Image (tube, rainbow, N blue to C red):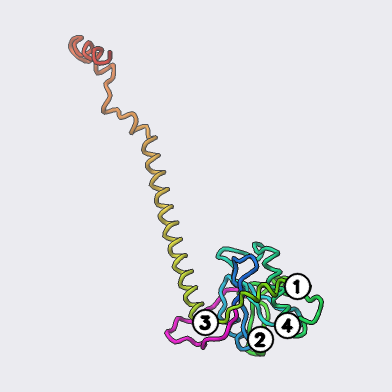
Amino acid sequence: INCSVHLPPVSSVSPSPPRMVFYFTSTCGQFTIYMGKDKYENEDLIKFGLPEDVWFHVDDLSSAHVYLRMKPGMSLDDISEELILDCAALVKANSIAGCKKSSVYVVYTRWKNLKKTASMVDGQVGFHRPDNVRRMQVEKNNSIVNKINKTKVEKHPDLYQIQQDSMREMQMQKKQHRREEEKKKRDEELKRKQEKEEMSYDRIMNCEDMTSNADVEASEDNTAAEAYEDDFF
């Protein structure tokens, strides 16, 4: 099983025409939620997602594909219950059969866990790792859906280009992180070397700069000893 993200090579021509995508703002106002207009948009959303995206769908029923864009560095465990409920309520409301039910089950997983094969119809997906798919029950919640729908904005983004730009930015950040780590390692090594030199007995007690009692006594008279004692006192 391979969950790594394989992206198409960079090209000046986007393989995906602009699609109609609906964007929403979470009730907390800090996150973007989005979904495609229909199954054709869903196909592009499946193909051109980002690593920080989380996919939501009504379990065992036809529904929209709703995505949450997490902040960089977040995991599924970092998503608040309030934010999960926003996405779950929205995907339930955008299911023809699910919106009529008092409650449904919703599944969600990270975008990179979605698996698409040639035999699947438009909008159908599988999972690289089914164990990484979470399932929850959600009740009808019109107040949440109405609040989220007020933030709805229709856009026609180039999803391919957005994905490519995001991956370039990630690669630049990784390179910068590696450079910083390498510099940190060099600085630490230099510091250890300097500390070792400062603590070296040979550096602190340089015998060539010291005068011993034997050197003083080796003079023909006491002049050297007296001078030494005068200097000392």
Q: First in sequence, mark 2 or 3: give its number.
A: 2
Residue type, label 3: Pro
Residue wearing tag 3: 157
Residue wearing tag 4: 95
Which quarter of the image is occupied by the N terminus? bottom right
Task: Tell me what residue is drawn at x 62 percent, y 64 percent.
Answer: 75
Write the start and end of the magenta stretch as one range. 1-22
CA distance separating discs 4 and 3: 24 Å
Residue wearing tag 2: 123
CA distance separating discs 1 and 3: 29 Å
- Closer to the eye: label 1 or 4: 1
Label 3: state its secondary structure: loop
Residue type, label 2: Gly
Q: Badges 4 and 3: C-beta atoms under 8 Å apart?
A: no
Quadrant housing residue 119: bottom right
Label 4: state its secondary structure: loop
Pick the residue in front: 50 or 115: 50
